[in-house]
Structures are given as C-alpha cells and as structure tokens.
Image: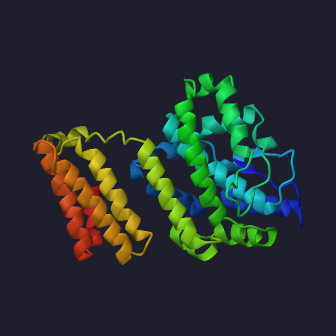
C-alpha cells in the first residue's frame, strides 16, 4: 500500500516514481524487507513463508491510496512505511494476512482520510490511529475477511504495535521533501537492512533501538506455531522434541539480534543475561528429556557468544 504525495514541490509523476520504485517489491527492497520480518517476527525465517505468495500475487505497487488531504513526499513516505510494517505485524497478531487488513482499510476509504505525518513528535500518528481503530471496530468487512470480531484486547495490542512502529518510522524515514527524494532513490538500490539504516536513517541509533523494541513487542504477542519435522526424516521426531521449537526460535532471535549491533560487548552481555534467565526458569521445572534438550540448546548458545563462534548459529538452524 502506497500513500501517494498530493502536495508537490516538484514533478508529481517523478515523486510517484520514487515512491513506487522503493515500495514496489523489486529484488533489492524485497530482500531488505524479508530481513526486517525475519528479525522482528517470533517465527524468524519460518514467518517469511507466509509472505512469499503475497509478494508474488499482491505486490505493494498494486495497492495505492489517493489521499483527500495534502501530503508532501516526506509525509507520504513515512505513512507508506508505517502502513506496510504495521499491517504485517497486525496480521500476525490477528491471524490473518496483510492483504486482508489493507483491503478493509481500502473498502472503508480510511487511507484516503489519513492525516499528514507529525515529524519529530511524541505522537507521530496523531489522529490516524483513531481512524484505523474505528475502522477495525466497526467495519462490516472484518467478519468476512478476518473471520472474527476484533476485540478490545486485540485493539490494545495493535495500538501498542502501532505506536512502536510509528517511533521506528519517525526515526528511520525522511523529514523533508529533499531528503525524501534521496532516501527513496538511493534506498531502492540497497538490499541490506542494517546498511540502509546506517546510511540513510535520520537517526540510525534510535531506529535500531525501536526495531529491537518492535521485536520485543511481537515476541510478547505472537506465539511460534512450531515446525513439524519432514515425514522422510521421521526418525528425528524421536530424538528432537517438537517442544524445542519455541526455545529454538527465541535463541535464534537473540543470536541474530547481535548481528544488528555488530556483536558489541554491551549487546553480548545483554544476550547472555537473557539466556541465563531462560536457564534459570528451566532449572526450576521438573527435569524431563524435553527440558534437558532445551537446557542444552541454551547452553550451546551461551558458548557461541562467549567464544565468538557465531558461524555455528547455522547448526542451530538445521535442528
């Protein structure tokens, strides 16, 4: 979903081209986007499978909104970025697809009424969250497309996600039209999320901070569904418990998060504390074969960090 700029400083068709060039799923931006999903989503790389078909059948360039209000290129960029990240996250919480959420917002004409972005504000979304919340509460299309009513508890979770994503986008995206042009034109040529943030984010440090905050929020609200072993390797099911999946995903997310900090000492210390806390909780439970596997996995991750042997993360992925 692209929110087009309607308040133009220069050539309006050129500005549309910048937006389409970045938010359409070209090979480079698609790769960067998959890196973001893999990092923040509790199911890690397994979460990407949900979006592969969506990328093939419903590229973001096919959905675009013509706002009634006036947006310059910077506001349109941040709103488009916010809608994309929010819909991906919200869909996982609600058990639906981003396409369904975007369809509801389009059918109710919500996106065309979205107000300009409040740059550098404590509340960058302003009234926009209220517009989306009211749509999700009252739309007759919710039952049809999502298959259930959205509860107050659901809305509270979505509100928290919306606010974190807004802080992320405000620190990441451009504040003015001139920089928006550079941000979009050069950003579409970058296929590495960390490189893009470090080179073009308004505030790289805060962007990485809010990216981590989003990851924590999603881990709080989205439970990994687990991975069933292939039938042809059914013998593994006898030695590797399906109950190990949640710990595997959490351990991998902790280890992969270190990459975004260039394996800084502070980040490694924080990761070791988190793993130690997991070991402490498991040690309080009854010792079973499943718990012993979990303890072994976490202890292996601790040694990876202490020895700096991060290439061995691949061994965990293969379990």
Nearer to the camera, 233 or 124: 124
| Snapshot quadrant of residue 176 | bottom right
Q: Which colour assignment does the render follow? A: rainbow
Left/right placement of residue 305 relative to residue 199 reads: left
Left/right placement of residue 128 relative to residue 151 reads: right
Q: Residue at x 87, y 44 (%)?
A: 68
| Residue 133, placed above or below residue 18 | above
Nearer to the camera, 81 or 119: 119
| Residue 133, placed above or below residue 297 | above
Q: Is residue 55 visible?
A: no
In the rendered image, the residue lying farthest to the front is 122
Q: Residue at x 45, y 46 (%)?
A: 49
| Residue 171, placed above or below residue 159 | below
Q: Is residue 158 visible?
A: yes
Q: Position of residue 292 (x, y in %)?
A: 13, 49
Q: Residue at x 44, y 53 (%)?
A: 216
Left/right placement of residue 188 relative to residue 297 reads: right
Q: Residue at x 68, y 61 (%)?
A: 22
Q: Position of residue 21 (x, y in %)?
A: 71, 61
Q: Position of residue 76 (x, y in %)?
A: 76, 56
| Residue 285, placed above or below residue 264 | above
Left/right placement of residue 306 relative to residue 88 reads: left
Q: Position of residue 250 (x, y in %)?
A: 33, 53
| Snapshot quadrant of residue 156 | top right
Q: How many marks?
A: 0
Nearer to the camera, 117 or 201: 117
């Amino acid at each position: 979903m692209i929110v087009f700029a309607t308040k133009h400083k220069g050539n309006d068709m050129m500005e549309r081209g910048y937006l389409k060039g970045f938010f359409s799923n070209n090979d480079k931006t698609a790769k960067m986007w998959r890196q973001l999903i893999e990092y923040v989503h509790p199911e890690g790389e397994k979460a990407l499978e949900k979006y592969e078909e969506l990328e093939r059948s419903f590229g973001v360039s096919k959905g675009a909104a013509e706002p009634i209000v006036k947006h310059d290129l910077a506001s349109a960029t941040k709103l488009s970025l916010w809608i994309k990240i929010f819909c991906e996250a919200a869909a996982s919480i609600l058990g639906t697809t981003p396409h369904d959420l975007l369809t509801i917002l389009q059918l109710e004409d919500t996106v065309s009424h979205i107000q300009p972005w409040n740059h550098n504000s404590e509340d960058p979304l302003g009234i926009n969250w209220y517009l989306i919340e009211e749509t999700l509460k009252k739309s007759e299309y919710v039952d049809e497309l999502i298959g259930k009513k959205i509860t107050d508890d659901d809305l509270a979770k979505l509100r928290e996600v919306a606010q974190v994503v807004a802080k992320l986008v405000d620190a990441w995206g451009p504040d003015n039209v001139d920089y928006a042009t550079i941000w979009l034109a050069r950003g579409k040529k970058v296929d590495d999320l960390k490189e893009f943030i470090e080179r073009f984010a308004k505030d790289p440090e805060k962007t990485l901070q809010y990216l981590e905050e989003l990851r924590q929020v999603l881990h709080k609200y989205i439970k990994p569904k687990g991975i069933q072993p292939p039938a042809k390797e059914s013998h593994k099911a006898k030695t590797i418990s399906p109950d190990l999946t949640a710990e595997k995903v959490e351990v991998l997310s902790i280890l992969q998060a270190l990459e975004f900090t260039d394996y800084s000492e502070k980040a490694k210390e924080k990761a070791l504390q988190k793993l130690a806390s997991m070991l402490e909780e498991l040690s309080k439970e009854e010792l079973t074969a499943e718990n012993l596997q979990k303890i072994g996995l976490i202890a292996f991750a601790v040694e990876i960090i202490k020895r700096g042997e991060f290439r061995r993360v691949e061994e965990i992925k293969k379990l």
